[in-house]
Amino acid sequence: MIMIMIMMKVLDAHDQLKTMVRYYAVTEATSADTQWQMVSNSLFNMLKNSVKLSGDLHRQMNDVYSFYVDYLVTDVISTIHRADDLYAQVTTTFITVSDDGDSQQIDSLVEQLKSVQEKLNDFDENLEKTVRYSSQLFPKRLLVLCNAIKQSLDSALGTQLAWLEGFPSESQFVEVEFLRDASEVRLRLAQTADCMEQYKVDLGNFCEWLDAVQPPQFASSLLPTSQMDALDADGAKLRTILRSFVDGSLTKGELARQYLTKVDKLMETNVDRLVTDVKQSVFNKLDGNIDKFQEFLGSFFRELFAMYVNLQKSMDSNDQAVKKVARKHEIWRKPAVNFQSSEVRFGSTRFHTVARNTSIMDTRCNNKIMFYL
């Protein structure tokens, strides 16, 4: 009788294991994989909303820059480029033609360099005239961020303009010194142009980064139903020999012998194999998916807010528009998850899950992109 009770407990534990594995690892409707998909789909929606919110912010900043700032920056940069071209021509004449240079070229260069100084000195004043057209997201500190470079340019220009305006002087033309000084001025001109255009470059990089956002893909971690076949067969064998003993077809000794030779070791082997498969194919993969998505979201929001901070530097401290947009992201809201429902809530916002392999279309900076869930 004790033998029968032990075998019944083995059969009961075996059935419980099969039920648990089917519930969490095999049946799609109740599996841990489906529960993860419910959460990840809602997180994908949160990510999609963050990208859309940032895309809207980019379009507003780009519009403000294009309408009220770009023409001023372009004017300064084009003036700098013309000065650089003239510098190259004057230098070529000095080195390859005559130490006396070309007086007309030199006069043009002097006039152009003074024009660069004038436009840089008037830039903030001219920019201030257009601020009234946009109360927020206005990059009014463009030149402030370039002050150190501008001061280096002013210093280099002061020396070169004095020399160029007094040329030809009684002092002998020293080719090496002129090349060094000219190179210094041209370097400062290039640095100033790059700095003045940096905000526009940052806007372009922000747009490209948003367009390149690609959420990670997750393979299904469901266990194939065929994995349960061996356990079903083992359970059926154990039930058969128990039934045979109950109806008198087997003696107690035959019952024990058949259990030990045909069922016990095989059942243990198949159970161990199934448990290992569940760990590796389901839960380890699930842990990996969660870690992968956590790392992706952390990286995404770190880069996103770093770009926000970088763009905010060009704006007045009283301009809070970027900060207000940053606060709208659902990442700050505490999620409420209900695994009995196909919804995850972030604060007052409700997200519905979508079927796997569904594409989400979203228009961002310039392109239409696809999120594959």
Image (cartoon, grey):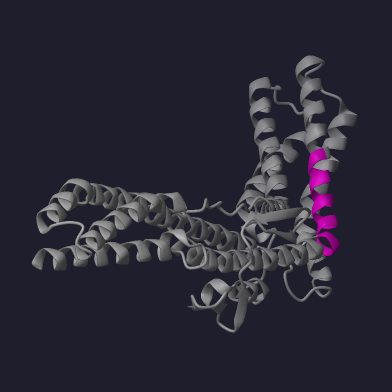
* Residue at the bottom extreme of this rendering: 348
Q: Quadrant of residue 348?
A: bottom right
Work out whether residue 130 or residue 109 is closer to the camera in this orientation and state it: 130
Name the residue at 75% across, 40% down. 161
Question: Is residue 173 placed above or below 3 in the rendered structure?
Answer: above
Left-right relation of 99 to 264 = right
Residue most toward the right?
104
Tell me what residue is drawn at x 83 percent, y 44 percent: 78
* Quadrant housing residue 32: bottom left
Residue 294 % position (x, y):
46, 60
Q: Is residue 319 visible?
A: no
- The secondary structure that most of the magenta stretch takes on is helix
Q: Position of residue 42 (x, y in %)?
A: 57, 69
Residue 101 image position (x, y, % from top left): 82, 23
Left or right: 105 as drawn, with respect to 219? right
- Asked if residue 364 lies in the magenta stretch, the reply is no
The residue nearer to you, when weighing 272 against 304, is 272
Q: Nearer the viewer, residue 321 or 358?
A: 358
The N terminus lies in quadrant: bottom left
Which region shows up in magenta? Answer: 66-81
From where the camera sits, is residue 278 visible?
yes
Vertical arrangement, residue 24 with respect to residue 92, above or below: below
- Image quadrant holding the C terminus, namely bottom right
Q: Is residue 52 left or right of residue 302?
A: right
Direction from residue 73 to residue 157 in the image, left or right: left
Q: Position of residue 166 (x, y in %)?
A: 78, 35
Please give the name of the residue rendered at 85% of the width and 56% of the height, measured from the top-left corner: 71
Q: Is residue 19 above or below residue 225?
A: below
Residue 76 part of the magenta-drawn span? yes
